[in-house]
Image (cartoon, grey):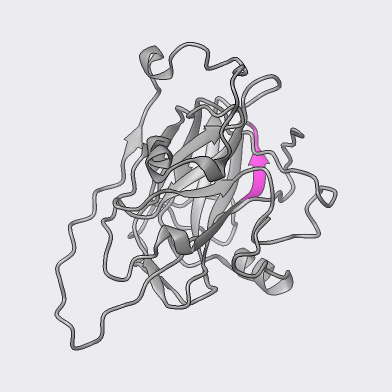
Amino acid sequence: MKRLVMSLPLAGLLLLTACASTGPSAPVASSPTPNPPGAVGQATEEEVGAGWDEVPDTPIPDEADLSDAERVEFLRLPATDAAGPASCRPEDLTGQLRYWDAALGHRFGSILLRNDADTDCTLSGFPGLGARGEWGNKFHVEAEQELYHRPKERLARDVDGEAPPPVTLAPGEIAEAYLEWTGALAGSGSEWAQTLYVQTDREATPVAVPMDRQVIVEDPQDPMAEGEPLSIDIGMFTKLRVGPFEAPGEHVLRLVGEYELLPPGDTP
């Protein structure tokens, strides 16, 4: 796998989708109260176990061979909101992590979420996160759900203000969740993230987002040759900060408008 960490816009992102809404005459059920934004700190040696820094001598299961229960086991931090009648279903979502830029010890990107269902669906609150490495290990990342609003300068963080309202996605529409990773970044000879797991609500199976290829937006300005795998330097103990689901920023909408999106179900 090619190791690339660049200050130019790189690629990656993530999409999600899903359900139908109740009619105006239907009774309104009260939804469970969302959990406040949470965090999980450094893992203990007991959690990580022995051999985490060595390539295993046994076969590594493919992502397609994992069960829903196994994907849940990769989560480090659950989503804040419970499922509602119009929540997006994980099987209707396609995702990509878009790598926007880098600073000293920090990487900035967005999880982009696309609704591939034929009905509207809703995303709300903060996503849950987990990661799996290229050697098949669960990553014991630190993770923090953090309220932020993206100002005009897309890489700056503004944590003032109120949480954004739920995002309703029509078929083919995209939502965004800010992601920053920092701290113990993956280096030469260490295990790099291969799959990011994004949980859309507390009852949902995490959506598996591949970290080594572009899926949603193909950007000709990315400094990568066509067909080259994309590597994101999230490692075993990297710290992730994620924002809430919200309507995509102008930069995302421009990319979507300028570059063709792969049709639903046509991901590599």
In the image, 59: left or right of 87? right
Residue 240 in percent (x, y) is at 48, 38
Which secondary structure class fits the magenta region best? Answer: strand
Q: Is residue 219 magenta?
A: no
**Residue 5 in sight:** yes
Quadrant (top left, top right, bottom left, bottom right) of the C terminus: bottom right
Rendered residue at 52%/41% (across/down): 65
Quadrant of the image occupied by residue 95: bottom right
Q: Is residue 99 magenta?
A: yes
Residue 242 in percent (x, y) is at 45, 46
Which region of the structure is painted magenta? 98-104
- Return the residue nearer the eye: 195 or 126: 195
- Return the residue nearer the eye: 101 or 18: 18
Quadrant of the image occupied by residue 167: bottom left
Rendered residue at 18%/83% (across/down): 26
Rendered residue at 29%/52% (across/down): 203
In the image, 247: left or right of 44? right
**Residue 15 in sight:** no
Residue 134 in percent (x, y) is at 61, 31
Residue 69 in percent (x, y) is at 37, 41
Rendered residue at 34%/66% (across/down): 87
Against 8, is 21 above or below?
below
Question: Quick one: which residue is furthest to the bottom in this view?
Answer: 25
In the image, 45: left or right of 34? right
Against 112, is 25 above or below?
below
Number of callouts: 0
Quadrant of the image occupied by residue 64: top right
